[in-house]
Amino acid sequence: MQRATIWHNPRCSKSRAVLEILRERGIEPVMFNYLAHPPDRQSLRRVAESCGGVRVLVRSSEPLYAELGLDSADDEALLDAMIANPQLINRPVVITRRGARLCRPPEEVVALLD
């Protein structure tokens, strides 16, 4: 069976849709509650690099993004902000042996599956 980890927010429809796609394919992923336990800097950086960069993982639509003035922030400031405020981490992120991907739209997860 293929292994997968999902940075999941059960309140997010996209996150629930990705979970459904994984389960339809017989994959019961490890659920990572990034809101309760934010990833450490090294993990966040590694996943961001696999997804296309730190800015890809930032939820710029969150009001806090504007409040913190993150439009012109560099990668280090963005990482700091996401670690301190995990609601700024975009979701859902799925990690498999093929890499990590921000699955927006949810069908993006298929590219990570065998």
Image: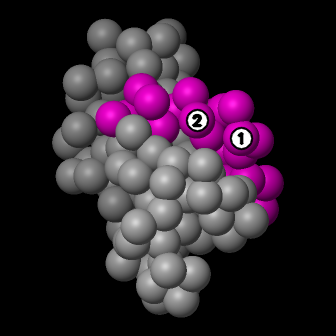
Q: Which mark is residue 31?
A: none
- The residue segment tinted magenta is 27-52
Q: Residues within 10 Å of mark 1 (few under 14, many from 20)?
A: some
Q: At which x and y percent is residue 28? A: 54, 32
Mark 2 in CB contact with mark 1 (< 8 angstroms): yes
Which color scheme is applied? one colour
Mark 2, secondary structure of its residue:
helix
Left/right placement of residue 76 relative to residue 101 reads: right
Q: Is residue 57 above or below residue 72?
A: above
Identity of the residue drawn at 33% across and 35% down: 52
Mark 1, secondary structure of its residue:
helix
Q: Which mark is residue 41?
A: 1
Q: Which mark is residue 45?
A: 2
- The answer to which of 50 and 77 lies nearer the viewer is 77
- The answer to which of 108 and 44 lies nearer the viewer is 44
Q: Please check the rendered image and state whether residue 29 is part of the magenta-colored stretch, yes or no.
A: yes
Identity of the residue drawn at 52% across and 48% down: 75
Amino acid type at image mark 1: Arg
Q: At which x and y percent is residue 21? A: 31, 40
Q: Quadrant of residue 31?
A: top right
Is residue 110 visible in this depiction of the protein? Answer: yes
- The answer to which of 53 and 96 lies nearer the viewer is 53
